[in-house]
Amino acid sequence: MKKLWLIAALLIAVPAAAQQALQQNSYLPITGGLRTEGVPVAKFVDTFNSPTTLDTTGNWATPTQNGTGTATYTQGQEILSSGTTNGSYALLTSQANFQINSPAFLIFRGAINFQTPESTANCKQIGLFIAASTPTCAAPVTDGILFEVTAATTSGNPGGGKLQAVAYASGARTLLADLSIPISGVSWAPIFSPDGVTLVCPGRTIPQPQTDTCPHILDIWFNGNSAEFDVDFKPVAFMLNGSLGPNNNALQWSAMTINTGGAAASTLKINQASVGDEGRNSNKFCDAIYPFRCLNVTANGALVPSVPLSPITGNATGTTGAVVGTLAAAAGKFTYICGFNISTIGGTAASSPITVAGIVGSSQVYQTPVNAATGQILVSQSFTPCIPSSAVNTAITVTTTANGTATAVDVNSWGFQQ
């Protein structure tokens, strides 16, 4: 990847002949025009501004907390803890899977606090990846391009507590660089407070911070064919061949910490999360708040959601008891209700109130007339736009009140998952 700032830095440090070659590579060979690279367009961002709650409405799936692992939100941070028992873990993943737009790059960014010193018994992963269904430090990820803090049981036996740049393809791990050792010619200057005296973050010659609790910026530039890893805005590792990378290139912004036998928990503090698209594919109809939600254009010019809809129904029948029609939940998806109808026959009581629950905001309640011995009571309601569930992986129910004299009660509801 040729970033102009990187080329400028290299021109200062390399001999004249090499400088000439770099300058030539900075221009298009046919037109002579200067190669440029636009600032990536944000596809996903969370600075954790909410005073009390992680945004599981638009940005995140509900964090997975297994065993004694925990995910704790405070304003400005999401804190993942591995817990203190073997096999426990905490996992944070974006709702969206981000598609590459090669030859342009996606950029992953995570502003995090390292734990110093890092545990040698537990492991951490942060980057663009899909976690294994039952993650362990030996097999944490199915596909991804990421930073990993190793454990003693990490594949390849690298030793514990090391920051490494890695790729996973169908569960197989490829080490791209060990970032726990110095890189020749690369160092980070100390950071001082405005008084110029008080040390805020110490300088270092190793990409992995060893002794500080300062926040650090981890970037991954990835287009499927190649990748660059940056720590605090300095390149520290590269993947120069796509055969080393993941097999599945539709990846989530993910972070995870796993206990593999450590007596103490390992924590990962996430201060900011974002994904940008260098290709600037902004010629779409996209949501202003959640820019990964866009419409696609079909071959015949029709607009369709970029995330497919899965139509569902929730139907149920009964007599004298309460009848519940359920629009099912789905992991990582919202459930939407687009309408319902309820028909009641027989009896001398009402099957109301009718309650629509599980929707964003508060439940909706409907009343019906008292039933008659003959004839039908019919309640029908459509929603435009359709109403989403209160959170991902949450069902929506339509429930009648028990009518001890009814002959038949039918509940029909319809909607979709997305």
Image (cartoon, helix red, strand yellow):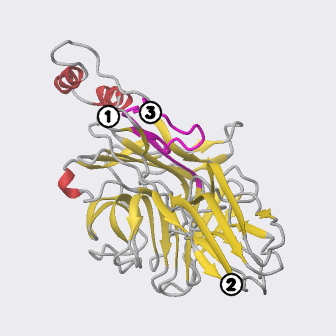
Q: Which residue occupies the extreme front position in the image?
A: 374
Q: Which residue is mark 2?
A: 319
Who comes first in sequence, dot 1 or dot 3? 3
Magenta segment includes 276: yes
153 lies left or right of 115: left
Who comes first in sequence, dot 2 or dot 3? 3
Q: Relative to 39, does residue 251 appear above or below in the rendering?
A: below
Check disc 2: other Cα within 10 Å, few if <14, some if 14-19, many if 20+: many
Distance in Å between CA atoms under marks 2 and 3: 50 Å
Magenta stretch in the rendered image: 271-296
Dot 1 lies on which element? loop
Magenta segment includes 22: no
Distance in Å between CA atoms under marks 1 and 2: 48 Å
113 lies left or right of 218: right
Task: Give the amino acid at mark 2.
Answer: Thr
Task: Give the amino acid at mark 3.
Answer: Lys
321 lies left or right of 291: right
Task: Give the amino acid at mark 1.
Answer: Asn
User: Which quadrant of the view contains residue 70?
Assistant: bottom right
Q: Which residue is mark 1?
A: 300
Residue shown at 74% from the left, 79% from the top:
346
Q: Which residue is mark 3?
A: 284
Question: Closer to the observer: label 2 or label 3?
Answer: 2
